[in-house]
Image: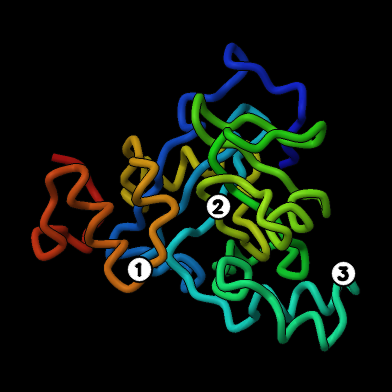
Amino acid sequence: MALSSKTSLRERGFLDGNLLIAMPGMADGNFARAVVYICAHSDAGAMGFIINRSQSVTFADLLLHLELIDRNDAIMLPDHARHFPIQCGGPVEQNRGFVLHSDDYLSDSSIPVSDDISLTATLDIVRAISDGRGPRHATMLLGYAGWGPGQLEEEIAQNGWLHCAPTESLIFDRCLDNKYDRALALMGINPAMLSMDAGHA
């Protein structure tokens, strides 16, 4: 499913801007203990990003690959760029980069996801981040998670996912190891209390 820059508040699906939290019995290994931020949800399907998976590629590696800097420039990158987080956003198109960010940065290609969060997938934001002109909060994700029409709804009905409203701090927090547990805590859930069996109370 593709996002459109013409997406408006009225066209947002009920899961847009929400978190999906994988249940312990999640059969798909790509999503074991995954926390997914949903960017688009409609009758056509859904699209989002895993926000708690690390990625071995660094921002400097990316800038070199895109030929935005050379080796000498890479050595001189400021701390904010050198340590800018890049994560594995999902199993689809893992060679494609997206930047999820606070709405203090907007370009013609930026797509609003919620009132506070936007998505940009063009080189202008990469240049802005490397130059110190980027958004206040941001993370880059390689790849994304996608679902066909009705697929996500079926997975939720089969007890595959919980969903809840996120906090901005959780979305952009760079501490990934316990983000799953902290996402559950937003719902008042202790991970030890979750059942791996499908079904509903």
Name the amino acid, label 2: Ala
Q: Which mark is residue 138?
A: 2
- Which residue carries the number 3 mark? 68
Image position, residue 21 (x, y; %): 35, 52
Q: CA distance from mark 3 to mark 2?
A: 19 Å
Quadrant position of the N terminus in the picture: top right
Name the amino acid, label 3: Leu
Q: Residue at x 71, y 62 (%)?
A: 130
Res. 186 image quadrant: top left
Residue sticking out furthest to the top: 10
Which structural element holds mark 2? strand
Q: Nearer the viewer, residue 20 or 158?
A: 20
Image position, residue 34 (x, y; %): 40, 62
Image position, residue 98 (x, y; %): 69, 54
Q: CA distance from mark 1 to mark 3?
A: 28 Å
Q: Nearer the viewer, residue 54 or 188?
A: 54
Position of residue 75 in the picture relative to residue 68 (left or right):
left
Q: Nearer the viewer, mark 3 or mark 2?
A: 3
- Which residue carries the number 1 mark? 175
